[in-house]
Amino acid sequence: MDLAILLDKTLNLPLHQQLYEQLRQAILTGRLFPGEKIPSTRVLAQSLGIARGTVKLGYEQLLNEGYLETATGSGTFVCQQISDRTLPILPAWPRCLETSITAGLSKYAQNFKQQLLLSNPSKLDIDFCYWQPAFSHFPLHIWRQLTTRQLQSTDLLDYSSDLLGYKLLREAIARYLGRSRAVSCNAEQIIIVNGTQQALDLIARLFIDLGDRVVMEDPGYSSARRVFQSRGAKILPISVDASGLIVEQLPSTLTPAIKLVYTTPSHQFPTGAILSLPRRLQLLAWAQQTGVVIVEDDYDSEYRYGEKPIPAMQGLDLNNSVIYIGTFSKVLFPTLRIGYLVLPVGLVKIFAQAKRLIDRQSPLLEQCVLADFINERHLERHLRRMRTLYNHRRQILTNSLKSRLGENAIVLGDAAGIHLMVQLQTNLSDEEIITRAAKMGVGLTSAASFYLESNRKGQFLMGYANLETEIDEGVCRLAQILDV
Amino acid sequence: MDLAILLDKTLNLPLHQQLYEQLRQAILTGRLFPGEKIPSTRVLAQSLGIARGTVKLGYEQLLNEGYLETATGSGTFVCQQISDRTLPILPAWPRCLETSITAGLSKYAQNFKQQLLLSNPSKLDIDFCYWQPAFSHFPLHIWRQLTTRQLQSTDLLDYSSDLLGYKLLREAIARYLGRSRAVSCNAEQIIIVNGTQQALDLIARLFIDLGDRVVMEDPGYSSARRVFQSRGAKILPISVDASGLIVEQLPSTLTPAIKLVYTTPSHQFPTGAILSLPRRLQLLAWAQQTGVVIVEDDYDSEYRYGEKPIPAMQGLDLNNSVIYIGTFSKVLFPTLRIGYLVLPVGLVKIFAQAKRLIDRQSPLLEQCVLADFINERHLERHLRRMRTLYNHRRQILTNSLKSRLGENAIVLGDAAGIHLMVQLQTNLSDEEIITRAAKMGVGLTSAASFYLESNRKGQFLMGYANLETEIDEGVCRLAQILDV
């Protein structure tokens, strides 16, 4: 073990005394933890370039005073008991510096002034969480096998010179998107990123300047909105109906500049509406006229129940006006942190260089494992299974809502995705419902925060993918809250 | 397998004809790849909600025309032969849109106008690459064991509510830094990021506005410089001597605002000088006076040979004016993409929220594995081995330079890190040397691009960590090039 100790031979304080002082400080300030093993006198003497006897003197004093203890045979340790007496002392942040630093922060940092809670949300026993896939059904054993196989070789340790991401993965994704989403691209148009969030951040950086406008669905995906706003964009909200974004409402005037239209056509977030084909073609026509770029966030496209597939806009587009975003967070698992961008050819190099400057490249191991997972057909097998499972779970939820809440609950949106949106007939405020539900151990999400203009109440997101037997019980408790 | 096909019952083109046309298009445009298996008539009919007979009709025509082929028992496939005739057709980027898009790009995007080559650099048989650790000595089997163990449980699949990164890893890093680098922090001051590059990007975003000044060592780490410049910062270069950054040369006037001082004290990049203790204290004093934040990039601190350890500035600092950056890219391997920031308490929440908005969180699996790797003492055991190995390899290189180049090669910098900088006495230009070396299969890096003001020639970075037997041969070829 290393031990950073600083001795100054020019001082007239003897070296063993300096050593004693510094170790004592390290222990008291918590730099050295109770029970921590410290180097042998020989090793430390060597690494500090001093006589072993000097180190011995220092250690002995610390042993005598109970800062250190020895276990015969196994060496010298920081005393356990100390833990009770002293905890690590945190350097307090002096007022003056607090301000001076805050003054030093950039305009971008102002986005984070209203500080979020960093602590964990309380665990609920029935959480209708809208982003969770069925974790227990993920083929972890296969993933483990593929990972172990990849970790046989040291090839994946060095930087890849491939700025777009692991080539075999990009090729696998291109084929997968081609057949399942009618996306027309090749591997050289795909850039691997750390999930949808980084895809949005890259787009925002490369397109948005202060004051630019971004068209968003209202209600819409708030994490995307925050990214655009953090770059100084003005959000232009367009309403959503049962067929998704109401394209007729798009403005004809383009000043100030409209840079992007952000849309979630496969499963509009949060309403769950699927953007109809006519609307898709209409939107593409508008984009062609105006030259505005469409950001197609195709999340949840993998899950439709009964609905016929509608091809991605990217594939319907003939003018390279679509940037397509996909992610494996819901299809596989969120902490994988792998998503991708499908870009018009002319934008690939710029995006690749920006990604490189931002964090060089995404971790390689997962990319290799994922490529195998797709190429060996595990992905589509898993998707087929989950489609059946989620459809089943969705039906449990809708039936349960019908039987227990009747007219008081109207399910909105199409049969797709891994959550639904429900309109509750109640006089209670959304906050009241959330609080009462939490008290009963039930979690659901109000849609209010996703609205920009109209302030709808009583609309809630309910995820069902990671629940089954608990679903009816959860709805039952909800019914009690609403005293139906 | 999914297949996105769009049928329109309102058209008077029969459905089987529409199906035929779309599959044919998909095959010709490369959306469906040669040899790709396509769904059975039953499955497709079901997913499209049409009669199986209709699908059969469409398939038969494609079989007759040789677009599809059947393998008895195993199903229907896209014909292999097609591959020769047609390759995927890339949507060409219409001129008009090219311009309109480029017009749509942000000021930030202008950083990427001079487009880098995305292709791989040619492989050299003796590459004195300055960032590569000894890949073949990485304990891959242990890493594999720990990974397999972590992949036993589905716990690591869901988002962590911990915005700072995996808690056990942060605690392990805090302890490791405490004992080995005299860094004084606890786990709540550490944020896990995707390597040094993302750490720098976060710092630049949160501190730099257009026109702000950043002090950098000259020569200095160009990847850091590019990040600061991409945010519109003016770089203020300060020279480096044998004791590192010449602190006396720091400006006393702070207008326009100096936001950051970026330094690499443990192994100045690229010169290899270790910032002396007096200089460290001097720099901290300056920071205290001015309130400017010091960014301590402590890369390569793990590797000193013979030198006594000098504690990190973060631990010497009493005024929370230091942001400390560490990475595992050189200690373990680059594609791990795990680095960390040690922050003054007052900055933690802002950085955590920014990281969350940028890409939510770093992948969890590696964080869990790394925590085990550190806590089970593998990290320090590995470091001890590598220190011996690299010291040995460094000596091979220095001896070989002495014996083969004599006075024509002067080794600069201290005995630390995994590369050294050498001053070659020659009339050849750096480019000429690089080109000639490459012809002989030898790779080395000119230091010229790391200089901002003075245009030094004949200085080269030579990495030795990932080489051993080849080292002398490489230097021998170098001698021939310089005709010594």
Image: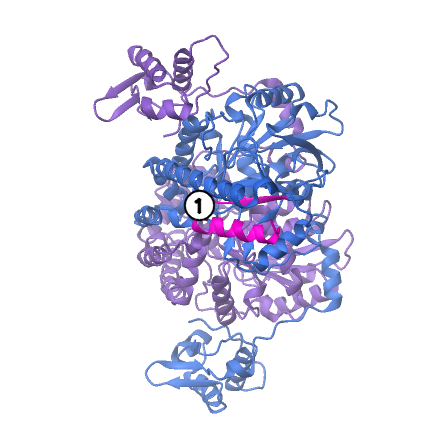
Chain colours: A blue, B purple
Q: Residue furthest top?
A: B12
**What number of labels is visible?**
1
The front one of B324 and B173 is B173
Q: Is residue A482 magenta?
A: yes
At horizontal 41% and vertical 56% (from top left) the residue drawn is B332
Q: Residue furthest left?
A: B72
Let me know if residue B219 appears in the view: no
Residue with the mark numbered 1: B444
Query: In which image quadrant can residue A87 be found?
Result: bottom right
At horizontal 37% and vertical 81% (from top left) the residue drawn is A75
B168 shown above or below B32? below
Left/right of residue A302 with respect to residue B457 in the rendered view: left
At horizontal 57% and vertical 28% (from top left) the residue drawn is A275
Query: In which image quadrant can residue A198 be found?
Result: top right
The front one of A109 and B201 is A109
Position of residue B381 measured from the top left corner of the image (x, y, whole percent): 37, 66
Q: Is residue B112 magenta?
A: no
Which chain hosts label 1? B
Q: Amino acid at mark 1?
A: Leu
Span highlighted in magenta in the image: A459-484
Position of residue B169 measured from the top left corner of the image (x, y, whole percent): 47, 62
Position of residue A68 measured from the top left corner of the image (x, y, whole percent): 46, 84
The front one of A365 and A283 is A283
Q: Give the structural element (helix, strand or loop) at label 1.
A: loop
Let me know if residue B445 appears in the view: yes
B350 shown above or below A19? above
Is the residue marked by circle 1 packed among few (<14), some (14-19), or many (20+) residues within 10 Å?
A: many
Quarter in which the N terminus of chain A is drawn: bottom left
Position of residue A469 measured from the top left corner of the image (x, y, whole percent): 43, 50
